[in-house]
Image: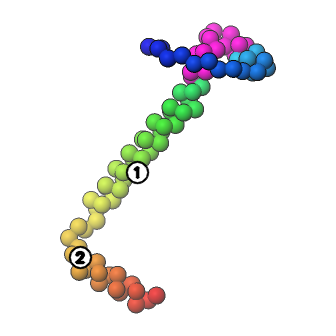
Amino acid sequence: MLNKRTNILFDETTWEYLVKLANNHHTSVGTLVRQAVKKQYLNKEVTVQSQRKRAHQLVKQLRSNIDSHISTNEILEYIHEDRKYE
């Protein structure tokens, strides 16, 4: 349901282009603008969120494949061992 309103000013050339485009698509300029906003901003946000969710799932999957029985002392030993070669 559309219940918010805005006014947008266009130069004459842009307005004429949008009117022709709207006529070609059998729609209104308002519909074209709403579709453009969704495509440019809303869909990208959904894409970013889905990419973040997928990355999180991959990290969880990687963590589940790692041997989680490594003690803190073993981790410290690995760190000290690595520092010997610096």
Sequence-wise, which precedes: disc 2 or disc 1? 1
Element marked by disc 2: helix
Q: In this image, 16 relative to 35: left or right?
A: right
In which image quadrant can residue 35 be found? top right
Q: Residues within 10 Å of mark 2 (few under 14, many from 20)?
A: few
How far separated are the C-alphas under marks 2 and 1?
27 Å
Residue 27's spot in the image, x, y percent?
Answer: 61, 11
Residue 13's spot in the image, x, y percent?
Answer: 79, 20
Q: Is residue 40 magenta?
A: no
Residue 25's spot in the image, x, y percent?
Answer: 64, 13
Which mark's residue is nearer the viewer, 2 or 1? 2
Residue 86 sits above or below residue 56 on the image: below
Residue furthest out toward the bottom: 84
Quadrant in the picture for the N terminus:
top left
Residue at x 40% of width, y 51% of height? 55
Q: Residues within 10 Å of mark 1 (few under 14, many from 20)?
A: few
**Where does label 2 land, which residue?**
72
Residue 60's spot in the image, x, y percent?
Answer: 31, 55
Q: How many marks?
A: 2
User: Label 1 sits on what residue type?
Assistant: Ala
Residue at x 27% of width, y 59% of height? 64
* Most common SS among magenta residues: helix
Q: In this image, 14 relative to 57: left or right?
A: right
**Boundaries of the magenta span:** 19-35
Q: In this image, 26 relative to 81: left or right?
A: right
**Where does label 1 land, which residue?**
55
Element marked by disc 1: helix
User: Label 2 sits on what residue type?
Assistant: Thr
